[in-house]
Image (tube, rainbow, N blue to C red):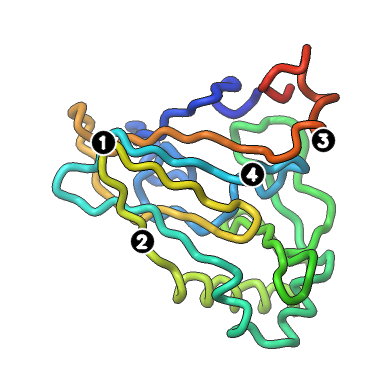
Amino acid sequence: RQEKSGALVQNVVPVRGLEASQSNAGSVPLEFHIENAFHPYRPDFVGLNCLRQAVGQKAGTLVSSIRRALPVIEESDRRVLHQARFVTAPPPSFRSGGSTEAHPVLDGSPDDPNIRVDFNATSALDDEAKQALERLRVIMMDLSTAVELSPGELVFVDNRVVLHGRAPFTPRYDGRDRWLQRVFVHLDNRRTRVHRTDNGAVMG
């Protein structure tokens, strides 16, 4: 409910005065992240529907998969990233609570792990973990791909294994700026049933 007042379809547009923010209202490069990395009930998929692209600019969504990155990550770093040596802070829109309890960045099967990180909000709890996290960040950036959506195109990102970010663009605030719509998809709604009033679609 704290994310855009619980809207099921969320407008992603630049907001004057928030250009430098690490949020969907900004227009500077957005650090790679999974959606709601701090939250225990993160979406399994994130859908992005393009209504309007920035005029004359390539304001692409950037994606990077841990499946592509895993063979490049040193085994010693993998071990560190699989340990609960990291915390993630919530975004400003979520005003309740501080950072998460310590958690791993990679979890599940060592051969095909899930990834849980927001390079703007996730911090390491010790120097070794900090260095492993920074090396992961560089690898994910190096292996990233731009997805440049045209109006009417929709992409779904697997929020369990794929990070996404944003290439920079210059907003004009003239009614022709980049405009995406975002939706969250959960595969198992029973996990969140207790947090949804009257079995509705919005978590309180």
Q: Which residue is mark 2?
A: 146
Classify the position of the C terminus by image quarter.
Answer: top right
| Front-lying residue, 185 or 56 | 185
Judge left or right: residue 159 versus residue 52.
right
Residue 168 in sight: no
Q: How packed is label 3: few (under 14 Cα within 10 Å), some, or many (20 or more)?
A: few
**Residues at marks 2 and 4 touching, judged by CB atoms closer than 8 Å:** no
Disc with the residue nearer the chain's start (3 vs 1): 1
Residue 154 lies left or right of residue 56; in this view the side is: right
- Foreground disc of the pair 3, 1: 3
Measure the C-alpha gap from mark 4 to mark 3.
16 Å
Q: CA distance from mark 4 to mark 1?
A: 25 Å
Residue at the disc numbered 3: 191
Disc 4 marks which residue?
A: 36
Q: Whole-Å distance between the Cαs marked 1 and 2? A: 17 Å
Using the numbered discs, state the Cα–Cα distance from disc 3 to disc 1 in whole angstroms: 35 Å
User: Image point 53% across, 77% down: which residue?
Assistant: 139
Q: Which residue in the protein does label 1 denote?
A: 52
